Amino acid sequence: MYDEVVGSTGKLISPIRGPGTLGEVLVAVRGGTEGYIARAAEAIPAGSTVLVIAVDSGRIADVVPWIPLTPDPAP
């Protein structure tokens, strides 16, 4: 199921302690913020920025740690 938050980043407000455990992520949506239950294949600490890669019908968001791209240093 497609959800408009797929591809968005959010802030993990409760940790995901490892595979099979759940946390909570806040995602900016339509000028506000919505909470989703979050799950991941790895542990992610609270306060981390994550990328939402999928959402199922139960408002459970699959997330991965967000690592922003940084430009290569100038020569």
Image (spheres, grey):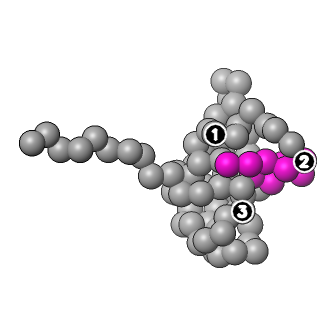
Answer above or below: position of 69 versus 22: above
Q: CA distance from mark 2 to mark 1?
A: 16 Å
- Does the magenta run of residues contain 75? no
Look at the image and tell me in which quarter the N terminus lies: top right
Look at the image and tell me in which quarter the C terminus lies: top left
Return the disc, 2 or 3, that comes first in the chain's sequence.
3
Magenta range is 53-61
Answer whether labels 1 and 3 touch (C-beta < 8 Å): no
- Residue 24 in view of the camera: yes
**Residue identifier under label 1:** 7
Q: Amino acid at mark 1?
A: Gly
Q: CA distance from mark 2 to mark 3?
A: 14 Å
Q: Position of residue 32 (x, y in %)?
A: 68, 29
- Residue 13 in view of the camera: no
Residue at 71 percent of width and 37 percent of height: 5
Q: Quadrant of residue 23?
A: bottom right
Q: Is residue 29 left or right of residue 68?
A: right
Q: Amino acid at mark 2?
A: Ser
- Does the magenta run of residues contain 54? yes
Question: Which residue is at the front of the view, 1 or 9?
Answer: 1
Q: Position of residue 35 (x, y in %)?
A: 73, 46
Q: Amino acid at mark 3?
A: Arg
Return the disc, 2 or 1, that comes first in the chain's sequence.
1
Answer above or below: position of 32 versus 26: above
**Residue identifier under label 2:** 57
> Residue placed farthest to the front in the image?
75
The numbered dot on residue 55 is: none
The numbered dot on residue 39 is: 3
Residue at 59 percent of width and 48 percent of height: 51
Callout 3: SS: strand
